[in-house]
């Protein structure tokens, strides 16, 4: 598994399961040397979009 894919999976899992603050999660990814700088930001942005899409989907199912 590539570093980017591994970091993305960590970010997505942590955001969904623990609702981790993006800044905290970015710090954790950097501390563990998974990725650096802009790559971490891009992964977090993608993960946040994914969780937002999942939340909207769940909300739509509940209200529909």
Image: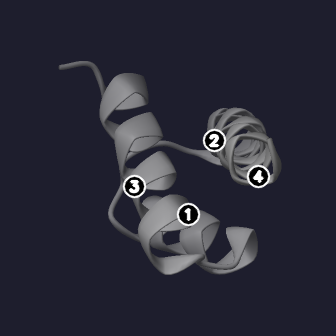
Asked if the residue under mark 1 is in contact with the one under mark 2, i.e. CB atoms within 8 Å, the reply is yes
Instruction: Pinpoint residue 2: horizontal percent, then vertical percent.
Output: 27, 19
State left or right for residue 62 relative to residue 31: right
Q: Which residue is identified by label 1?
A: 15
Which sits earlier in the primary sequence, circle 4 or circle 1?
1
Local SS, label 4: helix
Q: Left of 46 or right of it: where is 14?
A: left
- The answer to whether marks 2 and 3 mark residues whose Cβ atoms lie closer than 8 Å is no
Distance, label 2 to label 3, CA atoms, is 9 Å
Labelled disc at residue 13:
3
Determine the CA span between mark 4 and mark 1: 17 Å
Distance, label 4 to label 3, CA atoms, is 19 Å
Vertical order, 33 against 1 (above or below)? below
Front in this rendered view, residue 34 or 50: 50
List the single residue furthest toward the top. 2
Find residue 9 and report its image quarter.
top left
Residue underneath mark 2: 47
Q: Are marks 1 and 3 in contact (CB under 8 Å)?
A: yes
Quarter location, residue 14: bottom left
Q: Which residue is mark 4?
A: 59
Identity of the residue drawn at 70% across and 53% down:
62
Q: Position of residue 31 (x, y in %)?
A: 42, 71
């Amino acid at each position: 598994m590539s570093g980017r894919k591994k970091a993305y999976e960590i970010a997505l899992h942590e955001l969904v399961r623990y609702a981790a603050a993006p800044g905290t999660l970015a710090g954790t990814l950097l501390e563990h040397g998974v990725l650096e700088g802009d790559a971490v930001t891009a992964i977090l942005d993608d993960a946040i979009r994914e969780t937002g899409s999942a939340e909207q989907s769940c909300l739509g199912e509940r209200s529909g």
